[in-house]
Amino acid sequence: MMMMIVAEFFVVILKVLWAFVTAGARWVVRPKEKSVAGQVCVITGAGSGLGRLFAKEFARRRAILVLWDINSQSNEETAEMVRQIYRETETPIAEDGPVGGVEEVPAFKPQVYTYVCDVGKRESVYSTAEKVRREVGEVDILINNAGVVSGHHLLECPDELIERTMVVNCHAHFWTTKAFLPKMLELNHGHIVTVASSLGLFSTAGVEDYCASKFGAIGFHESLSHEIKASEKDGINMTLVCPYLVNTGMFKGCRIRKEIEPFLPPLSPEFCVKQAMRAILTDQPMVCTPRIIYMVNFMKSILPFEAIVCMYRFLGADKCMYPFLAQRKELMNNNEAKNGI
């Protein structure tokens, strides 16, 4: 019995080493990207920011887009961008004719569907998901992208905003997944993408609710990944996206130490999404952008807390959100003053 355990342990070691080799090989040889043409892709928070860019990238790859957003107007604007991309990429397919000639047949024409959905309300998620299944079909790819930030220090943040942040950034992932995962499991086919944040791997001061929601989203994603592996459904893939600060305006005013900022500037949304798309299309389990985030996350796991505090202070990361919070507070005060006139 002991010999069997020892032998199995050595097999496990070999598999772990092989996992390191294959992971390293992905850095050297870029894996081939899979096709998503004709697949149904649901994107939450598609009306702006990263959601809109994800929609455009999937449109270029001829996926059928299902766009969810709480804002109908911005969602329709994204849909029109997608339709334009469809028109630009539309080409006829050449096929052999009935007598050996070549004739052109119309290419597959993907469509885009828009739905107004508040992912912070589970009834809205479930009813919208049912409409999608009825009007579009079964979902192949789910991009959990919708997110909000309250922009208040903890003791100044209304409880309602804390709850809203947790529900939209974390709880909504449970509901969208429960809506679409059963059919993926039945067909052993699908891909679930969690758009989280580097602030779900390590935190900073002033955004406790946001960090907690992203930590929760990552915990949910990792647990679900293990559950899918345990069920031996090898046709279902999971990708976790953890970008550094993205220049979408969501955290406008956030600043690290000015001497360090040229080496670690905010990411352009386009670069962030292109890196994420590469990971999704090659079935990469996790992508951190930029790559230094992998190192920061590793160091956070092994360094004493006081050492982490010293590094934060050196980088100016300890209070990097304070200018952003001050701007939000000033904006709110100005709005209250205008409403009071």
Image: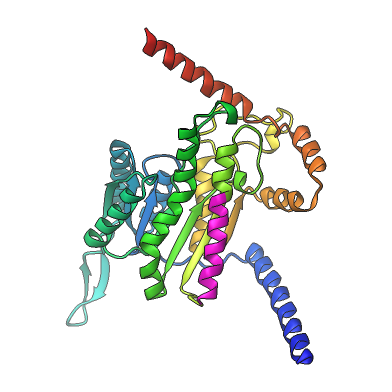
**Res. 331 in view:** yes
Taking the image as shown, residue 1 lies to the left or right of residue 333, namely: right
Of helix, strand and loop, which mostly describes the magenta segment? helix
230 in magenta: yes
* 95 vs 247: above or below: below
Number of marks present in the image shown: 0
Which residues lie in the magenta part?
216-231
**Res. 284 in view:** no
The one of 307 and 88 positioned closer to us in this rendering = 307
Tell me where residue 116 sits by quadrant: top left
What residue appears at the point 70 percent right and 37 percent down from the top-left corner? 263
336 in magenta: no
The x and y percentages for residue 195 are 50, 50
What residue appears at the point 78 percent right and 33 percent down from the top-left corner? 314
What residue appears at the point 52 percent right and 68 percent down from the top-left corner? 32
The x and y percentages for residue 165 are 48, 40
The x and y percentages for residue 25 are 66, 68
The one of 137 and 93 positioned closer to us in this rendering = 137
What residue appears at the point 36 percent right and 55 percent down from the top-left corner? 42
The one of 291 and 117 positioned closer to us in this rendering = 117
